[in-house]
Image: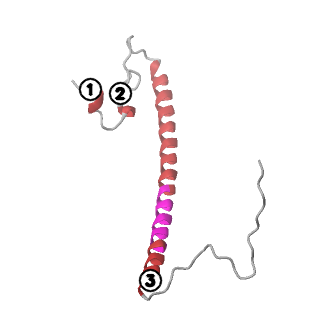
Amino acid sequence: MKSITDIRAGAANIKSARSIRARSAPKSKDSAYLDIFLLNKEKARLKQEQYILGKRQEQNRKRLEEIEAAIELAGMSARELERNLERGESLPSTAKLPPGKKWHTMPLSY
């Protein structure tokens, strides 16, 4: 007997009494319309889900391309810094102010 840990695809793939169309009463002739209605609703839901998944996949693809470009840019700047260090140049400091500029300070009293 299978347990819940044996299910690999997820809980969405568990068949319910409704999804396998098991009925407590015998099937009547009029239930064909209900079956058609339920199948059309499920078809519409699955098409919507497929559309959403397609959009999500496209967003993921674009983000992966952006990340690859950022990694390449960061790698190029790291190689440039290594070359500068090998030549004996110092690293540029980002904390220095241009000549003639002063820090703006203000007192804080509590």
Report the span colored magenta: 60-73
User: Is residue 12 left or right of 66 when viewed as pictured?
Assistant: left
The label on residue 49 is none
User: Is residue 84 left or right of 97 when viewed as pictured?
Assistant: left
Instruction: Say what amino acid the circle numbered 3 marks.
Output: Leu
Q: Residue at x 64, y 76 (%)?
A: 96
Secondary element at tag 1: loop
Distance between the alpha carbons at the discs numbered 3 and 2: 64 Å
Q: Which residue is mark 3?
A: 85
Instruction: Say what amino acid the circle numbered 2 marks.
Output: Lys
For disc 2, the neighbor class at 10 Å (few under 14, some 14 to 19, many from 20) is: few
| Residue 67 on the magenta segment | yes
Distance between the alpha carbons at the discs numbered 2 and 1: 14 Å
Residue 21 percent coordinates (x, y): 38, 22
Q: Residue at x 77, y 47 (%)?
A: 110
Report the mark closest to the observer, 3 or 2.
3
Placement of 78 over or under 28, stated as above or below: below
Q: Residue at x 52, y 79 (%)?
A: 91
For disc 3, the neighbor class at 10 Å (few under 14, some 14 to 19, many from 20) is: few
Q: Residue pushed farthest left? A: 1
Location of residue 104 (image quadrant): bottom right
Comes first in the chain, label 3 or label 2: 2
Comes first in the chain, label 1 or label 3: 1
Q: Which residue is mark 1?
A: 3
Q: Which residue is mark 2?
A: 15
Placement of 13 over or under 92, stated as above or below: above
Location of residue 8 (image quadrant): top left
User: Is residue 91 left or right of 26 when viewed as pictured?
Assistant: right
Distance between the alpha carbons at the discs numbered 1 and 3: 60 Å
Secondary element at tag 2: loop
Give the colouring mode of the picture: secondary structure
